[in-house]
């Protein structure tokens, strides 16, 4: 909607958001991001395979960007299932799905399997939307899940999101659009009651849209409008005309969203998911598989570096500081004993 | 190393941690600087390892809101990075807070100074509310003061958004002395008015130089409020007796604010009374407060760079010339009307308050009167 509205003199709140600034893409850009990530990952993993067992990458069929995306889509549907199991509010579900999708614009499934990422993003979303539950409750209700499955990736997820936890959702915008519809001239007094089912239908389209990329390409209110337009085409048209002198532009946008929702919002079929997941097991980054040879080697390397750093620090702390800063310095060292990478 | 991890390391390298400067309930705060520019910053290190549920809620809230809110009167979050089990928030470095200034008995506040702090508080708060964020913990020590005198709202560890009306919220928020009566009565559906009450208490405290409504327990807090402002009637506040934790704490008569705030201008008292209206829906909004007559009447708000500062701050203060005071004041107070503040010529030339000698004696009695022993 904002694209067609008259140029605002003051930036709208939405336009000041991190979502507006950092999480909007053109369809081409999205495709580019995904294929670049995919290619880079394949190159790295190939090298790792070769380093540990020369020749071992020759017959591996790595995932394509599309196949990665198929898996991501499958796990979006899983988030929805988990949310109904826990009876989480709409806000939690929508936020978790946004986090999950954003995560895979910065990472690939060959490094981080969607299952645990999904568990982490959902848990994080309960907290960022102010609906926290204890980790214990969370894990005991999900089959064969441990606390570390959820927490180990929490920092990585937060980092991948750029610590931008605030998300603007289409379901909220839908409520706004809905209220606005009722304010149209000659709207019957019982309009809200008469259209309760229509509202649910529109909400259904908003939910379906979460399986697509629309949230990266369009604004929440554009998506909401598309959902209403799929539900009540005539009323939407009327509303659009009354609201926007240049409704043609808005209509074009809305139609694009409608097409995407109608064609791309079904979860992938189980067979193709299984097939991709089977292949993923063979082409996963071995350094990210706990217990594998490559993983252990990488860990050992990290430990060694940390140890060296600690030693270096101990030496520095022991030195006499001619300028009399020992006190301040040693307190910092004491305080940082547990994290050796804080002395940057 | 992944791109994401690499980016984190890059971020980490941008900042240098120097000395520990303070400790809060869930964080240690260091003074630090930006490696490339030497810009002074505060690095708030939150230990996450100690929480069995991972990133804790205060940290999550603080990051969530500060990431979005960029305003001259809201503390700026410059960066976030993690190191092992810690989360590090890089914040602009702010030397002192309003509590320190209020408590520093060597400082004298002019009415224009109080007006300036109030204007900055309301501007920051109006911005939060416009962004659908409730602060829920406003008090003098969460209003930090930069070396150029700018006031910044800080500590968003209890904040939440209120885009969802009719959503049940906890009433266990806001430090007691600044907590509005609806929360003390257990109200679970509330809004921006809770922050306004807190600002009212801060306003009063600036004038009195001592906390205005200092109850000793939650129960006593209600009594303290009613003793000061009169027990509300059904007409003052329809429906309040139906609130979940409603109790009667005695009948107290209304006393005019004027009796306690003897030196305050009628405009100041009018705005104060509107912040402390019992019925939350009738309490003034931050936006309306910014358009209140108080901010347009004489004296005009002091320029931030000329506000009283704690001694510790003076040492690090920037030269006054560096601060473009005209820009400071014109932003929202005048609300576009091009009000009197904007129109005023550079104050340095003609302000009667610039003279430090007049400051040290001016109206001392007026504003220290209610403090015992002074
Ligand atoms: N931006 C900042 N610039 C300079 N010093 C700061 C800054 N933020 C915090 N400090 C210092 O660090 C101390 C601890 O701050 P922190 O915000 O963690 O806790 P607090 O608000 O004092 O207490 P609590 O955590 O109980 O609310 C402060 O008292 C202050 O001295």
Image (tube, coloured by chain):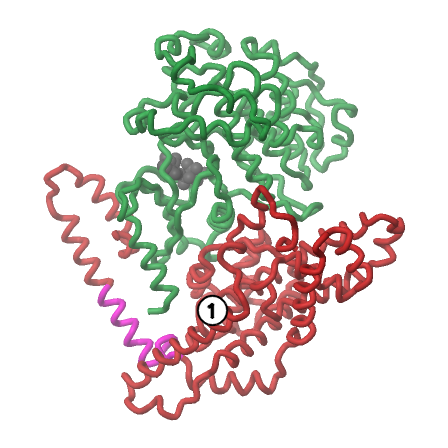
Chain colours: A red, B green
Q: Would you say residue B114 is visible in this rendering?
A: no
Left or right of residue B280: residue A167: left
Q: How many marks?
A: 1
Is A296 included in the stretch rendered in magenta? yes
Q: Would you say residue B250 is visible in this rendering?
A: yes
Q: Residues within 10 Å of mark 1 (few under 14, many from 20)?
A: some
Residue lying at 29% horizontally and 43% vertically, measured from the top left: B32
Name the image quarter holding residue B183: top right
Task: Name the residue beneath numbered marker 1.
Answer: A149
Residues A186 and B256: in front is A186
In percent of width and height, residue B80 lies at: 40, 52
In percent of width and height, residue B230 lies at: 68, 18
- Ligand 1 location (quadrant): top left
Above or below for B111 versus B118? above
- State which region is magenta: A285-305
Residue lying at 74% horizontally and 27% vertically, measured from the top left: B237
In percent of width and height, residue A32 lies at: 47, 72
What main secondary structure does the magenta stretch of the protein show?
helix
Query: For numbered disc 1, what is the local secondary structure?
Result: helix
Which chain letter matches label 1?
A
Residue lying at 46% horizontally and 55% vertically, measured from the top left: A163
In percent of width and height, residue B267 lies at: 61, 16
């Amino acid at each position: 909607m904002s694209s067609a509205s008259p140029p605002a003199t003051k930036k709208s709140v939405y336009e000041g958001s991190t979502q507006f600034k950092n999480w909007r893409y053109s369809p081409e850009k999205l495709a580019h991001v995904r294929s670049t990530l995919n290619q880079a990952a394949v190159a790295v993993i190939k090298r790792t395979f070769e380093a540990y067992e020369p020749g071992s990458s020759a017959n591996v069929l790595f995932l394509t960007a599309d196949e990665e995306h198929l898996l991501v889509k499958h796990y979006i549907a899983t988030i929805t299932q988990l949310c109904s199991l826990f009876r989480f509010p709409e806000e939690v579900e929508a936020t978790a799905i946004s986090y999950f999708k954003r995560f895979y614009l910065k990472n690939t499934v060959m490094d981080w399997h969607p299952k645990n990422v999904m568990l982490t993003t959902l848990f994080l979303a309960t907290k960022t939307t102010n609906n926290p539950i204890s980790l214990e409750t969370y894990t005991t209700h999900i089959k064969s899940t441990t606390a570390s499955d959820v927490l180990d990736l929490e920092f990585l997820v937060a980092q991948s999101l750029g610590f931008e936890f605030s998300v603007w959702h289409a379901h909220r915008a839908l409520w706004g659009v809905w209220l606005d519809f009722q304010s149209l001239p000659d709207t019957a007094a019982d309009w809200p009651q008469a259209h309760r089912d229509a509202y649910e239908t529109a909400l259904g389209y908003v939910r379906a849209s979460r399986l697509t990329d629309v949230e990266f390409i369009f604004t929440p209110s554009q998506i909401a409008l598309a959902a209403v337009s799929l539900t009540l085409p005539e009323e939407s048209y009327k509303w659009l005309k009354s609201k926007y002198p240049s409704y043609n532009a808005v209509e074009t946008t809305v139609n694009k969203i409608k097409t995407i929702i109608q064609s791309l919002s079904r979860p992938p079929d189980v067979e193709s998911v299984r097939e991709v997941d089977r292949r993923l097991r063979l082409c996963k980054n071995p350094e990210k598989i706990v217990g594998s040879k490559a993983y252990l080697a990488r860990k050992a390397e990290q430990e060694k570096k940390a140890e060296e750093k600690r030693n270096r620090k101990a030496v520095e702390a022991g030195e006499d500081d001619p300028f009399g800063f020992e006190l301040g310095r040693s307190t910092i060292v004491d305080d940082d004993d547990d994290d050796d990478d804080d002395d940057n | 190393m992944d791109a994401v991890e690499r980016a984190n390391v890059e971020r980490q390298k941008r900042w240098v941690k120097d000395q520990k400067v303070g400790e809060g309930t869930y964080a240690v705060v260091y003074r630090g600087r930006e490696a490339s520019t030497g810009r002074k910053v505060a690095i708030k290190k939150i230990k996450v390892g100690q929480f069995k549920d991972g990133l804790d809620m205060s940290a999550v809230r603080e990051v969530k809101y500060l990431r979005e809110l960029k305003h001259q009167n809201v503390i700026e979050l410059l960066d976030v990075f993690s190191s092992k089990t810690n989360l590090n928030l890089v914040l602009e470095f702010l030397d002192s807070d309003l509590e320190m200034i209020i408590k520093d008995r060597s400082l004298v506040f002019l009415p224009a100074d109080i007006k300036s702090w109030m204007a900055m508080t309301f501007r920051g708060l109006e911005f939060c509310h416009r962004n659908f964020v409730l602060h829920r913990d406003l008090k003098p020590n969460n209003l930090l003061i930069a070396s150029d005198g700018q006031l910044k709202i800080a500590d968003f560890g209890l904040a939440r958004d209120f885009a969802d009306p009719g959503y049940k919220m906890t009433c266990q928020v806001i430090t007691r002395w600044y907590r509005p009566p609806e929360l003390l009565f257990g109200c679970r559906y509330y809004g921006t008015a809770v922050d306004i009450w807190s600002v009212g208490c801060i306003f009063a405290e600036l004038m009195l130089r001592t906390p205005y409504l200092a109850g000793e327990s939650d129960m006593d807090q209600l009594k303290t409020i009613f003793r000061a402002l009169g027990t509300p009637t059904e007409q003052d506040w329809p429906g309040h007796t139906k609130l979940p934790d409603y109790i009667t704490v005695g009948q107290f008569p209304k006393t005019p604010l004027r009796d306690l705030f003897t030196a305050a201008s009628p405009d100041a008292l009018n705005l104060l009374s509107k912040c402390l209206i019992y019925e939350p829906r009738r309490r003034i909004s931050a936006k309306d407060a910014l358009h209140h007559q108080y901010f347009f009447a004489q004296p005009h708000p002091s320029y931030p760079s000329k506000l009283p500062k704690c001694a510790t701050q003076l040492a690090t203060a920037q030269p006054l010339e560096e601060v473009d005071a005209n820009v400071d004041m014109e932003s929202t107070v005048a609300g576009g009307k091009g009000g009197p503040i904007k129109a005023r010529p550079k104050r340095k030339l003609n302000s009667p308050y610039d003279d430090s000698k007049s400051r040290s004696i001016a109206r001392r009695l007026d504003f220290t009167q209610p403090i015992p022993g002074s």
